[in-house]
Amino acid sequence: MFTLLVGCPPFWHRKQMVMLRNIMEGKYSFTSPEWADISEDPKDLIRKCLVVDPTKRITVTEALKHPFFNTVLRKQSQFNARKKFQFAILCVRAMIRIKRLRYTPEPLRVEDALRDPYRVKVLRKVIDGCAFRVYGHWVKKGEGQNRAALFENMPRCEVYNLYINSLNR
């Protein structure tokens, strides 16, 4: 419900251990600007649902009797099956599109690829794979070392010998 209302999860942090600690302690907040437009009823229901101690947490029947659900039900005066079905179709289509976004390659212009080939994940994998085949080891990006280090190494002996032999022929 938290995520549906504002589009982000209640317990999120960049560091996984901090996020886990927030979940275990039940630390969340309604401070983001998205919460400014949300009324007090859904916030109250979320506060009662996101309680760490299960004995103090609201039950399902109590949650369904909460004023938030009663106000929502009062606003729906007529049930329209056609609109409900159209809305369900839109939701399914949206979910399919969202799932496909993960596999859709980003558009790439030649100028961008020439200027910064490591920006594109596919090119980065190809370059790193080729460098591994040439040098025989991975060159990791770390302190004092950059991607240019890939091209500062010496080629593997076998590859170098093949290259020299091809030149001699």
Image: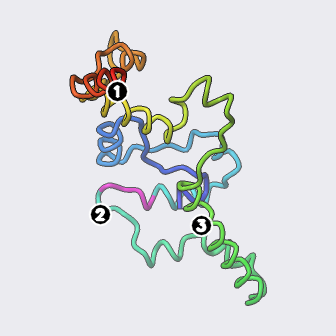
- Which quarter of the rendered picture does the C terminus lie within? top left
User: Measured from the top left, where is residue 55 in percent x and y?
Assistant: 28, 65
Q: Which residue is mark 3?
A: 95
Report the disc number at residue 54.
Answer: 2
Residue 167, compared with residue 2, is above or below; it is: above
| Residue mark closest to the camera, 1 vs 2 | 1
Residue 110, compared with residue 74, is above or below; it is: above
Q: Secondary structure at mark 2?
A: loop
> In the image shown, does 146 or 135 lie closer to the viewer?
135
User: Measured from the top left, where is residue 66 in percent x and y?
Assistant: 54, 71
Confirm whether the magenta stretch covers residue 49.
Answer: yes
Q: Residues within 10 Å of mark 3 (few under 14, many from 20)?
A: few
Mark earlier in primary sequence (1, 2)? 2
Q: Residues within 10 Å of mark 1 (few under 14, many from 20)?
A: few
Q: Secondary structure at mark 3?
A: helix
Taking the image as shown, residue 42 lies to the left or right of residue 153, namely right
Residues at marks 3 and 2, CA–CA distance in whole angstroms: 32 Å
**Prevalent SS, magenta region:** loop
**Residue 61 picture quarter:** bottom left
Q: Which residue is mark 1?
A: 166
For the point 54% across and 29% down, which residue is it?
117
Residue type at the position of mark 1: Ser
Residue type at the position of mark 3: Met
For the point 41% across and 20% down, which residue is it?
147
